[in-house]
C-alpha cells in the first residue's frame, strides 16, 4: 500500500515538474527570438494581444496540470486498498481531555 502511494505521489510531482519545465522552456524560446524587439515597436493592439495570448497559454498549461492531478487522484482511488486521506477525521483526543472533573 505504501509503495502504491509513493508511485502515485511521484507521478503527481513528476508531472507537475514536467509541465512547468515545458512552460518555462517555451517562455525562454520566445524570449530568445526577436519577438520582444518587435513587441516594443508594435502598436497597442499588438501588445494587448501578446498579453492576452500569454495569459491564455498560462491558463492552458495550468488546466493540463490540474487534469493530471485529477487523473492521479482518480487512479489513487481506484486501488481497492488505497483511500485518499480523509480531511474530516479528527485525531483521537488525549486521555486527560476525556477525564471528567469532580
Image (spheres, helix red, strand yellow):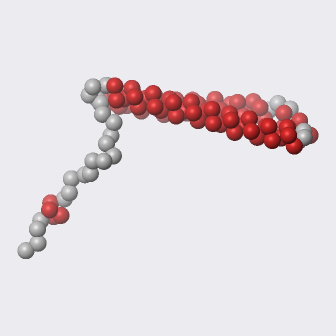
Position of residue 67 measured from the top left corner of the image (x, y, whole percent): 51, 30
User: Which residue is drawn at the image coordinates 52% and 34% (left, top)?
Assistant: 66
Q: Residue furthest left?
A: 102
User: Which residue is drawn at the image coordinates 18% and 64% (left, top)?
Assistant: 97
Q: Residue furthest right?
A: 41
Q: Is residue 99 left or right of residue 90?
A: left
Position of residue 32 measured from the top left corner of the image (x, y, whole percent): 80, 32
User: Which residue is drawn at the image coordinates 79% and 37% (left, top)?
Assistant: 50
Q: Which of 52 and 19 is in front in this view?
A: 52
Q: In this view, does 32 lie to the left or right of 102?
A: right
Q: In this view, does 94 lie to the left or right of 61?
A: left
Q: Where does the C terminus fall, quadrant-wise?
A: bottom left
How many numbered marks are there? 0
Q: Can residue 47 be seen in this view?
A: yes
Q: Residue furthest front?
A: 45
Q: Where does the N terminus fall, quadrant-wise?
A: top left
Amino acid at each position: 500500500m505504501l509503495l502504491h502511494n509513493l508511485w502515485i505521489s511521484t507521478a503527481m510531482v513528476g508531472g507537475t515538474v514536467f509541465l512547468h519545465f515545458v512552460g518555462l522552456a517555451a517562455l525562454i524560446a520566445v524570449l530568445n527570438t526577436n519577438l520582444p524587439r518587435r513587441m516594443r515597436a508594435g502598436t497597442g493592439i499588438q501588445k494587448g494581444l501578446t498579453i492576452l495570448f500569454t495569459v491564455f497559454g498560462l491558463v492552458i498549461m495550468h488546466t493540463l496540470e490540474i487534469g493530471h492531478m485529477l487523473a492521479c487522484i482518480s487512479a489513487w482511488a481506484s486501488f481497492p486498498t488505497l483511500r485518499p486521506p480523509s480531511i474530516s477525521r479528527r485525531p483521537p483526543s488525549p486521555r486527560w481531555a476525556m477525564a471528567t472533573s469532580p
